[in-house]
Amino acid sequence: MIKKIAFLLVAVALIAAACDSDSDDTTTTAGTAEETTTTAAQETTTTAAAEETTTTAAAPAGEAGTIIIGTTDTVSSLDSSDAYATRDWEVLKNFSEPLIKWEPGGADTLLPGLAEALPEISDDGLTYTLTLREGLKWGDGTDITNEVVASQLTRLLTISDTGPNQVGLTLGNPYVESIEASGESDVVFTLTQPLAFFSQVLAGGPYIPMHPDYFPEDELVIFPEPPIYGAGPYTVTEFVPGETMTFERNEFYHGDPPNADKIIVRHFADPQSMALAVQNGEIDIAWRILGSELALPLADVEGLNVAEIDAPATRYLVVNHVLEPTNDPNVQKAIASVVDRDEISDRIFGGAVTPLYSQVPPAFFGANEAFDEIYGSPDLDAARAFLEASGYSEDNKLVLPFWYPPEHYGATTADAMLIIAEQLEATGMIEVDLQAQEWSTYVGAATGGQEYPLFVLGWFLDFPDAENYTQPWIENGGQGSVVTSYEDNSITPGVNPELLVALDAQRGLTDPAEREAALDELQNIYAEEVVTVPLWVEPEFIVYRDGIAGDPNLPNPEALNIGASMEFIYSLLTDAG
Amino acid sequence: MHPLLLTFLIFGIPLLIGLLYVFFAGSPPLRKYIATRVALTIPMILILATVVFLVMRIIPGDPIDSTLGPKGTPEIKERFAEQHGLNDPLYVQYGRFVGNVFTLDFGNSLVYAQRPIVDELGERLPATLEMVIPATMFGLGLGLFLGTRAGMKRKSAGDYGSRIFSVVIYAMPIFWLGLLFQLVFGVWLGWTPIAGRIDPEIPLDRTTNMLVVDSIISGNWAALRSSLEHLILPTLTLGLVLSGVFLRLTRINVIETNQEDYVTSARARGVKEGTVTRRYALKNAMIPVITLMGLQVAILLAGAVLTETVFSWPGMGRYLVDRILTRDFTAVQSVIVFFALFVAVIALAVDILYSVLDPRVKY
């Protein structure tokens, strides 16, 4: 009996504990907006080409005024002083805004954002002054002042290194010495050195001021609780990690109100499911990351549109200048001479990728085709001559370890690397030792520069300028090229010191013609030294149902105004049902 | 209240009540057995935690490289290691980890925004349970039904059909079956959603993070309907694959039990065939099936990764695989300790169920 009573008492206590629960969570809203334009920015880049295929209507995914976007990208930080990923920046630029921004649809024109005009640059190129628009407010209605903007942007220089992504150490501190408020509404950036591309950097995600009530001056807030108020066209009203993020109108936005009341971004674990979801109307738009093999067949589906965007995602081989056998300049040049990019594009990607003959993609200002001009595309005889010069022959083959990550860059990586191995072996003088390694092991071994003589990596831009496609491999910041040591930036013996001079020379040039010439020289030396061997540029695809449209007055409306800057501005989207 | 605690209350309390009932109402040897098993759980988890801790540090790759990628300079990597205590001696890291286990804190993720692991488990575990429980019930029900019929009518057309079905369905790659169902039921017929847990346009207050439960609690019938619709394809896919193995196991055990003397004598006594099937053949054939069910549920908590991926279901399986690939030490260690607890509880429940099903089993 006592046992039964004891059991009952415990059971009742547990049930009482279970009933003592309360709920938490969820939603809120916000409201309206505008935008602005003005002059074009400096020189720089070019645009994105958009192609299209259409047919008739599919069932709309959402209610009137709601557009549902599918993505396989994950959000990893929502604090601009920490965020360092394309998806994070996309979110940031839809609920907030930098002082200057890219014209949607391209990457060649800068427009004022929270500032009323493009920056005034001092004669020595060291000071950038921007004046804030009048009457700016955060999404909760509080005022935005120049003091707040300056102190919030200073977080990038002071606390970014406390976060997981440490973006400030790459895109903040190396460029900016201080950010200060001046007068009634000016914000003044003092640079560490004159930088021709600083306006491009300034239009990036890290230079978006965050609301001080939710993002304190001395602490990173990576995932704030919604609602997340910014100064952009939308407010993030709900965020369920791994599932959805909801954007609703910000009524205090200074620009044109967004066309859609609500945007819901749905996360998919698998691109195949996302492709099926846009097909059955569960989502209106499938965006990042659909490969050509999934996106292109959807062009034949009634009611769907497929657009291709010249995305700045590159793949390249890193030739280690320290390890044997790739520390031999002849071996480096032989590798550069052998790679047939057209064959890779045709056999593996059905022609969907663009061969790359400079580390700078063709869509960017100053890009040339140095590798094609110097090494041909390909030239096996030249490759054999280089190898012979170093004593290799068909009887005395060069044994070349070649590494790649089988899963990180998609299923096609292994096939592409096999073709490169075939091309290298076609010289008759190289025996490739092709080896795969899982990413978390691979990346450390590769970028550490001490293990792999030859390996493949990919790059996606931080800001759309040739600087961002050359500096990371010349001033070795962990990209594994090892042409300079990280500590003192001294050049590897055997590598032309002119490389560092040429890199530095183009940085301060504000005259487009002069900078273009300097970039041309830089890329030529880069190719001569075979710092890396550029392979191809991969396009991005966006699929959307009939009725969804971008702004026809802006570039690339067929691609919903997404251009080479890869910015997707949700407020421009319209849904004709 | 934290969803993880609510999940424990929803599933743990009935289990605990059952355990306490058996403990207090059971014989002294059974009580001793239960007490011993519970006491052994602690060293078992400690040993497992230690093994996982060491293995994660022995295998190549680390969270610094996988988080920072090629853009991580040596200076940035060093800061990252310092901030996360990865430069500390191994025994210091181990002490910190064990301390976290005993306080059920588990610490923060290393790679994904440094979120508290408990919060991430609170999002993932309920989602997994919401999919795995109905899928197991469906698979078990179908497997038992077909397996019993096949076993009772051996060498009939139904028996052959069931055997072919069980082999084909078990051998079918689960992601392929999932994609097939998405294409047929989602795209061609338009009957079911393709992926996800609920229509994102339906607002729902998430209390337990089990959306069916949350919908009922809040009386949100649109959300209930939507969450049930979203459960159909994952449940069908996972359940069908599971049913194959349950079917085969049930069939063979029913056949064996059917040949026992007590079944023959029951028939000879004129006991109805339905009663023979239920009370004699099936009940005695259930012991290995129950064992398998317990193991399957434990495996599926982390092993439904393919189903979760195909249906974009943010559950534990995908979480664990992602974190292993990024070498998120704290997340992997914590999840495995959590699983160990779960498996220990399920194994104990299964052992106790034996004695209920078969009076010959004594402790």
Image (tube, helix red, strand yellow):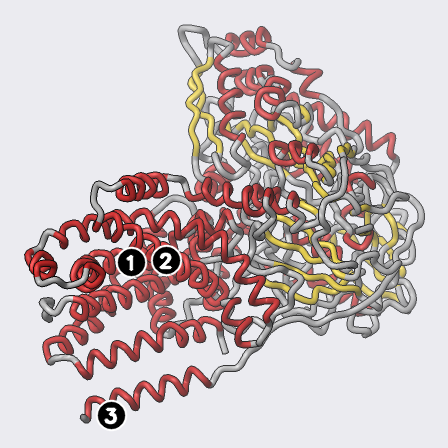
Provide the residue designation for mark 1.
B293
Q: Does the residue at mark 2 contact the one at mark 1 (Cβ under 8 Å)? A: yes
Q: Residue at x 22, y 89 (%)?
A: A4
Q: Residue at x 19, y 89 (%)?
A: A3
**Residue A347 figure quarter:** top right
Residue type for callout 2: Thr
Provide the residue designation for mark 3.
A5
> Residue furthest toward the front?
B270
Question: Residue A575 has which mark?
Answer: none
Provide the residue designation for mark 2.
B136
How much space separates mark 3 and mark 2, taking CA atoms? 35 Å
Circle 2: element type:
helix
Mark 3 and mark 2 on one chain: no
> Residue A241 placed where, x, y %?
57, 60
**Residue A233 figure quarter:** bottom right
Q: Of A455 and B132, which appears nearest the observer?
A: B132
Residue type for callout 1: Met
Numbered disc 1: what chain? B
Residue type for callout 3: Ile
